[in-house]
Image: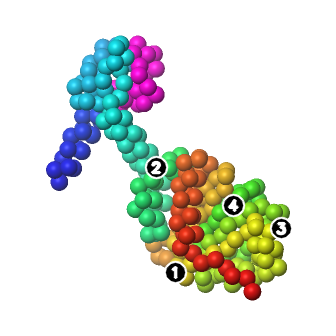
């Protein structure tokens, strides 16, 4: 608990002043003079000077000649603080999505990097458009050039979408649960599956255990779907992002599933 007390004191010192936070964020770009910070932030000279000297006294900032720069400690704390801000924004902006769903499919490491999803858009079905998430999913698939997907359930249209991509020569990598594997292959078409695998633009792997996340990643987007707490997949909400850090987050999750999955062996 002593460590939590220390953390609390550090956060209190930083969060008690918006000016200190702004100064630290400005200094992430490199050494600056007080007048440079003034031009960037429009804060008064006296406010900047007072707070920057307090930051120096606490070891976050140091003066080099006529400029100020972050110390190693300052860089670490500021980076962590920015990451924490993004995590809070990610969760609070879509609180019901995270609160009402099963997140057991995400590892502690995945949750630690949840800030990667900052700025994501939550696609929701509504009374005016009850198929909104499905239509968005189809649109994204149709325009994909390189696709990695985790399917936890079988929707009748998804094998058709995969079939079209394979026949167009688009690279597709799938991970599915064992109980839908045969149906998925049948609906794509055995001949198309074999052609895709032989051509090197299609692979399908399976896991024996239940999968509790739906994930689709391309070079341009990532979508995340989760199961509700009652065990049914929520087809009415889909998290979407086109940011690189979110795509990288999704690729890491896909790779961890793919490494544990078994590859389909053709007869």
Judged from the image, the secondary structure of the residue bearing numbered disc 3 is helix
Q: Which residues are magenta?
A: 18-42
Measured Cα–Cα span from mark 3 to mark 1: 30 Å
State the residue in front, 45 or 30.
30
Residue 46: name its quadrant.
top left
- Residue beneath disc 3: 167
Label 2 CA crowd tier, 10 Å (few <14, some 14–19, many 20+) = many
- Residue beneath disc 1: 209
Mark 4 touches mark 3? (CB < 8 Å): no
Select label 2 or label 1 by which is in front. 1
Q: Which badge, 4 or 1, comes first in the chain's sequence?
A: 4
Measured Cα–Cα span from mark 2 to mark 1: 28 Å
Measured Cα–Cα span from mark 3 to mark 2: 37 Å
Q: Position of residue 8 (x, y in %)?
A: 23, 44
- Residue beneath disc 4: 147
- Residue beneath disc 2: 115
State the residue in front, 128 or 187.
187
Measured Cα–Cα span from mark 4 to mark 1: 23 Å
Mark 3 touches mark 2? (CB < 8 Å): no
Measured Cα–Cα span from mark 4 to mark 3: 14 Å
Q: Which badge, 4 or 3, comes first in the chain's sequence?
A: 4
Q: Position of residue 227 (x, y in %)?
A: 52, 70
Residue at 67%, 50% in the rendered image: 220
Magenta stretch, overall SS: helix
Q: Which badge, 3 or 2, comes first in the chain's sequence?
A: 2
């Amino acid at each position: 608990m002593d460590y939590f007390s220390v953390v609390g004191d550090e956060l209190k010192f930083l969060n008690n002043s918006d000016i200190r936070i702004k100064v630290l964020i400005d200094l992430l770009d490199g050494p600056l003079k007080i007048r440079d910070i003034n031009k960037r932030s429009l804060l008064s000279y006296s406010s900047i000077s007072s707070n920057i000297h307090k930051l120096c006294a606490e070891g976050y900032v140091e003066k080099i000649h006529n400029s100020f720069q972050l110390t190693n400690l300052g860089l670490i704390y500021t980076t962590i603080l920015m990451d924490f801000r993004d995590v809070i924004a990610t969760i609070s902006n879509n609180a019901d999505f995270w609160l009402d769903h099963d997140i057991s499919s995400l590892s502690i490491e995945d949750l630690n990097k949840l800030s990667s999803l900052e700025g994501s858009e939550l696609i929701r079905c509504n009374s005016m458009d009850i198929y909104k998430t499905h239509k968005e999913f189809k649109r994204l698939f149709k325009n994909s050039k390189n696709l990695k997907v985790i399917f936890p359930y079988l929707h009748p249209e998804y094998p058709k979408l995969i079939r079209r991509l394979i026949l167009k020569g688009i690279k597709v990598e799938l991970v599915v649960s064992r109980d839908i594997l045969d149906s998925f292959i049948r609906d794509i078409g055995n001949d198309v599956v074999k052609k895709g695998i032989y051509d090197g633009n299609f692979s399908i792997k399976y896991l024996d255990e239940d999968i509790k996340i739906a994930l689709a990643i391309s070079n341009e987007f990532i979508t995340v779907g989760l199961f509700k707490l009652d065990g049914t997949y929520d087809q009415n909400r889909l998290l979407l992002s086109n940011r690189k850090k979110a795509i990288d987050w999704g690729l890491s999750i896909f790779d961890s599933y793919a490494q544990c999955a078994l590859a389909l062996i053709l007869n």
